[in-house]
Amino acid sequence: MRLMVKNTGYQALTVDSLPTRLGGISDIAVHIGADPSHWTVKEVGDGNLNLVFIVSGDVGTLIVKQALPYVRLVGESWPLPLYRAYYEYHALTRQAARAPGSVPAIRYFDAAQALIAMEFLEPHIILRRKLIVGERVEGLAKFLGQFCAQTAFRGSELSLASATKKADVALFAGNVEIPAITEALVFTDPYYDAEMNNHTDGLSGLVAQLRSDVELKVKVQQMLQRFASNTETLLHGDLHSGSIMSTATESRVIDPEFVQYGPMGFDIGMLCANFFMAYFSQPAHRADDLADYQSWILTVVEETCEHFDTEFKRLWNTERTGMLYPAALFEDQSHDSALACEVVLRNIWKDAWAFCGIEMHRRCLSLAHNADFEDIDDVATRASLEARNLMMAAELIHHADELKNANSVCDLARVHNSKDYL
Ligand code: SR1
Ligand code: MG
């Protein structure tokens, strides 16, 4: 089913109009306070797409997120359907069921207004910001590894009944324009001089070298084909460090509006890419504690991947109720299914490292760069750190199927971190 949310009746909220417009909605008022004239509203959206309000009152605080009918980063010249809020809402409900406690609780949803009111996370801040200022988060690797494994496994036909999963694939297939952003910005634009691209001065030689690597482009297009045509599981679809909020000890995943069915290795690969970019950018953000902090980031990557494997195997042994690799073929025949699980995991990681490299490329080569590098004012420093990131990424894409495990990938990061490519 494709949900068409027409613009009829839709109105973007403003700080001034929000209390009047939402004050009479009991599901919202019960969490903020009955008298909207006591509400304070702040617009804090700093992402690429939406309005985000923090609304506080006598009782408490909520986040109100509203989609705009265009890409905020670019403006009204790039229209974007409001229906993405509908898919985000459905993604959040599924993630809450499959990875309990991992996402903010939804308090209210209005499809026509493309609006979701949800739990205000406090004192959480965006993980990317923590990584830039050098803060550590306890339990991060376990949380992220388990989130990725639980959503990957429980959203697939390893767990779901085929009819349920296929109906869900049909529901999310209505979301066309949002995956199209990823198909272009992540998989295509970085590899030619697309109109909206930009890269740091000083990188043009390296960029030209990457764009002339035909084998690289073929590998990336193979991964795009997998991303667009493989409906293994329900993905978050945009799992970067800006889609995670953390305190010193607790984390949540937010913002799944890029949700779609896709390959199991996509989310974990994207996630690792963002840790590697945080890692490569560190020399520009700190001198004291640099080696220790960089090594903490790589430990998070290694442990996230270990937790992913451990949780995936646990689910394999305890929740394999779908049509794939049924007990009828293995355990019921007294045949161990551990080998099958290893093979499934091997394929996930092969995909993951290629997606990881592609994400590392796109954040330096197309639209929508990340603050880890963008916050580096000194252009020459930024270029030399991005160069390490770009070169490691190319190696990941070329050799994704030869990498033994996350530890070898982190070793690769250490090697590139010591190089001077410019
Ligand atoms: C035009 S949207 C650009 C990027 O912002 C989102 O967070 C996604 O990462 C997307 O690729
Ligand atoms: Mg987002």
Image: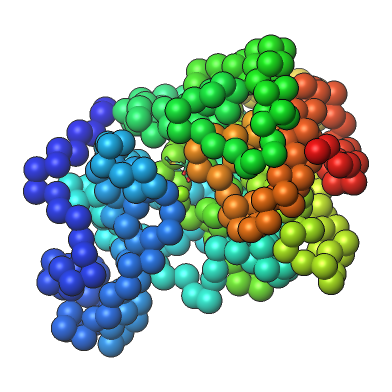
Q: Position of residue 361 (x, y in %)?
A: 65, 34
Q: Is residue 211 above or below residue 292?
A: above
Quadrant containing the C terminus in the rendered view? top right
Q: Nearer the viewer, residue 308 or 320?
A: 308
Looking at the picture, does residue 199 appear above or below residue 137? above
* Res 42 quadrant in image: bottom left
At a point 27% along the width and 60% down the height, the residue shown is 108
Give residue 106's position: percent from left, percent from top.
36, 60
Residue at 31% x, 36% y is: 78
Q: Residue at x 49, y 75 (%)?
A: 122
Q: Nearer the viewer, residue 191 or 347?
A: 191
User: In which quadrant of the rendered image does the N terminus lie?
Assistant: top left
Query: In the image, residue 364 lies at what x, y percent?
Result: 62, 39
Answer yes or no: is residue 1 visible: yes
Residue at coordinates 65% horizontally, 20% vertically from top-left?
211
Left or right: residue 311 versus residue 100 is: right
Q: Check the image and report above or below for 41 versus 283.
A: below
Q: Is residue 264 above or below residue 274?
A: above
